[in-house]
Image (cartoon, rainbow, N blue to C red):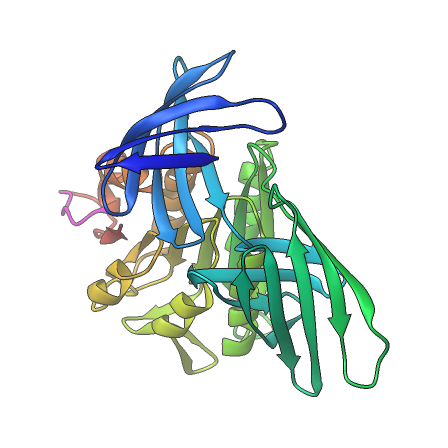
Amino acid sequence: MVLTQEGSRVRGSYGREVAEHPIEGTATADEFTFRYTEPQEHGTGRFKLKRYGHFAGEYLAEGNYRALPWQGWRGCDGLWDTPLGRLRFVEETPGRVFGFAEYDATARVEGTLAGARLTFTLESGNYSGRGVADLDAAGYAFSGEWFEPGQPTRALAGQRILPRPGLTWLVVVEAYWQRALDDNEFAFGDMLRELFARLPRVQVRHRYYHDETSLLHWCRQLLYLPEPSVLMLAGHGEPNGLTVNGKIIPQGRILDSLRYADGLKLLHFSSCLVGQDSERALIAAPFPVSGYKTSVDWAMSAFTEFIYLDMILEKGLAPAAAAQQLVSLVRFAGNEEIDGSPYRPAGFCFFG
């Protein structure tokens, strides 16, 4: 995609190989609202500039009711498949690159991009190396060399990992609810997997955590999913985070671990009290967050989240629109006291 801007007016074109489809609209400081035209369809959409090297948004073809995601990256920003494993490069300011490696949460990438040449270092514990790579003209691949102390120089190649159209991930990361050996086995993730197995375009993954390290491990794995994702964290909550085995996992560390998960469209805390005293921190997150302000009943949260997630994953609503609909469709989800109801208000809250 190539765009040019004069004042607030933006025009351009996009397409692979010889195709050039026109796109035009208006822009503010960080948002572009547009119309696009292709031979078989046309429609509208919007992009939000998340950082220098990445935008995220959606488009709606005329005649369709479901908006679909549309993301873009420039330079080396994005997710790459390499002999070093999956690497995520981030270019927040022109020319400065940092990143992460899927195989090791402690690995750190630092580098520079000058024109089409990327020079970077990767360090992880006792392991370190240096790469020099040139991007191809389309930005889909790079090739170069990899240097390690005391080792022969190796060829280094990378292929950009692009989202598969129409696919969304529902990732449920859950604490074990059982406290004693005679407790019955139950898990919220099992129910969600069965509920959404009917949707071929939704991939459900259910994982468990037992401490801060295991929870943050699964959160960081979302950095390496190229498609849109919804993350649900299920467990016991406190106003300042999640609690497991008597220890608090602070909200701030959870949010930081997900900051560069480009496809994350919603983080939902399926836990008590998380939205009670942390509105400022949750609003500042670079993705929508939802949860509860009360000590919510298990059955209430399950019923609420079945409808909430179904509106997002099956009906195609954006999380903000689903949250707005939810409190009118499921009355006890909100803050309203219902006469004669055996359920207290759940205090569902949404932070856009």
Q: Is residue 314 shown above or below 193?
A: above
Is 132 positioned to the left or the right of 71 in the image? right
Task: Tell me where residue 121 appears, x and y as whole percent.
Answer: 62, 75
Is 236 positioned to the left or the right of 190 in the image? left
Q: Looking at the image, which residue is at 35% across and 72% down?
A: 252
Regarding residue 185, the answer to whether it shows in the image is: no
Q: Is residue 342 shown above or below 27?
A: below
Q: Is residue 255 magenta?
A: no
Residue toward you, 181 or 151:
151
Q: Looking at the image, which residue is at 82% across and 73% down?
A: 153
Q: Is residue 337 magenta?
A: yes
Q: Looking at the image, which residue is at 64% across and 47% down?
A: 161
Task: Tell me where residue 242 appears, x and y as whole percent.
Answer: 39, 71
Q: Which residues are magenta?
A: 334-339
Regarding residue 297, the answer to whether it shows in the image is: yes
Task: Tell me where residue 290 appears, x and y as whole percent.
Answer: 32, 53
Main structural element of the magenta stretch: helix, strand or loop?
loop
Q: Is residue 132 shown above or below 186?
A: below
